[in-house]
Image (cartoon, helix red, strand yellow):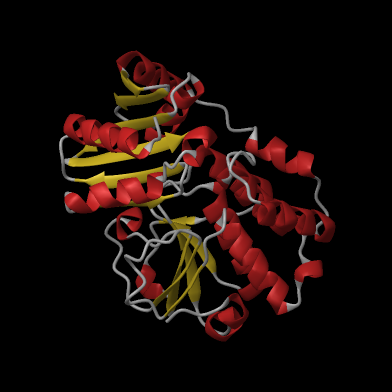
């Protein structure tokens, strides 16, 4: 059942609940879960692990999310920043809700309720929930910091931000006792570790390049750090980049697109979702950043993604 932000209080108050974040949870997921926990109470959990930036955020706001929690201990599981089953691994859900800004529908049919709106970050939906509760000007600095970190990170530090995002950021800076510089300092404390730096450099050396007109597509196979590798290829000059890895027969792919490519017609969320479904997998995300999981050879999958990306770009 789809509900508006104003009805969240009816479903989240007075129940033993956990806000469950997706695998490799990012600042948007952790920040949104933390803000919901402050507003309604409840635990914060994540599947598998947290991203390095999310770890820095969690340390800064003083929380320790439960990794792979026992969901049977709760009356309600609230999936935060995800509506794709592959992002929560093999978690078995019974009574659950979804709060997410992606437009995927994989987990919506059996949800007790869901709040889904196409904005730049889940943190914006949570901010709307807080405002509708009448407690916007009570938020502590940690909550403000967490929400801002989510918005900043999910927009690529505002490279893909809408006017609504800037409005929400302004409102939170006004309401919370936090400076923009503090948030950026938290997000900047997550340097690449040695293994990640090696993986990114290997990704660049293994990259296969295709182009049409002035559009450049870069694809690479890695053992880990798919998102960082795809982003590095974008920074090196690609318009669209895909990085794939294989884990126990499952191929994971992260894709990144430049603002210019997104403006020209690339929607990586739609592209990766459609190709994933062709091979019995799942995918989704944003126009400029998305991911997918399928049981399919990485090399062949990357070739299909590159061809599809070029077809969707205007030469």
Residue at 29 percent across and 68 percent down: it is 92
Q: Extreme top residue here?
A: 205
Residue at 47%, 49% in the rendered image: 25
Residue 170 x/y as whole percent: 78, 54
Say which residue appears at 62% left-offset and 75% top-offset. Answer: 40
Query: Is residue 64 among what the camera can see?
Result: no
Where residue 306 sits: x, y (%)? 29, 32
Quadrant of the rendered structure where residue 167 is?
Answer: bottom right
Query: In the drawing, does residue 220 fall left or right of residue 169?
Result: left
Determine the image quadrant of residue 246. Answer: top left
Q: Residue furthest front?
A: 315
What's the residue at 39%, 62% (across, down)? 83
Which quarter of the image is occupied by the C terminus? Answer: top left
Above or below, 118 relative to 3:
above
On the picture, is 213 further left or further right than 172? left
- Residue 10 in the figure: left or right of residue 254: right
Tell me: residue 72, above or below residue 189.
below
Res. 129 visible in picture: yes
């Amino acid at each position: 059942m789809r509900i508006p932000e104003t009805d969240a209080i009816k479903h989240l108050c007075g129940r033993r609940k956990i806000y469950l974040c997706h695998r490799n949870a990012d600042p948007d997921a952790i920040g949104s879960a933390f803000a919901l926990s402050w507003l309604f109470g409840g635990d914060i959990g994540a599947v598998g692990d947290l991203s390095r930036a999310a770890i820095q955020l969690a340390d800064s706001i003083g929380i320790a999310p439960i990794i792979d929690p026992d969901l049977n201990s709760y009356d309600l599981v609230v999936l935060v920043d995800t509506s794709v089953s592959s992002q929560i691994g093999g978690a078995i859900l019974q009574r659950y809700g979804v709060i997410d800004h992606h437009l995927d529908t994989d987990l919506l049919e059996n949800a007790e309720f869901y709040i889904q709106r196409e904005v730049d970050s889940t943190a914006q939906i949570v901010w709307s929930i807080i405002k509708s509760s009448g407690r916007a000007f009570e938020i502590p600095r940690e909550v403000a910091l967490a929400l801002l970190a989510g918005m900043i990170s999910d927009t690529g530090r505002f490279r893909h931000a809408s006017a609504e995002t800037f409005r929400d950021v302004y409102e939170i800076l006004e309401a919370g006792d936090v400076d923009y510089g503090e948030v950026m300092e938290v997000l900047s404390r997550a340097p690449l570790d040695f293994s990640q730096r090696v993986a990114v450099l290997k990704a660049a050396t293994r990259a296969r390049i295709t182009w049409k007109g002035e559009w450049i597509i870069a694809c690479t196979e890695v053992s880990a750090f798919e998102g960082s590798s795809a982003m590095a290829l974008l920074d090196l000059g690609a318009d669209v980049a895909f990085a794939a890895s294989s884990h126990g027969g499952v191929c994971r792919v992260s894709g990144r697109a430049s603002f210019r490519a997104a403006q020209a017609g690339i929607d990586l969320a739609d592209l990766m979702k459609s190709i994933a479904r062709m091979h019995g997998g799942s995918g989704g995300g944003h126009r400029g950043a998305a991911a997918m999981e399928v049981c399919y050879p990485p090399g062949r999958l990357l070739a299909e993604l590159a061809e599809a990306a070029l077809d969707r770009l205007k030469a």
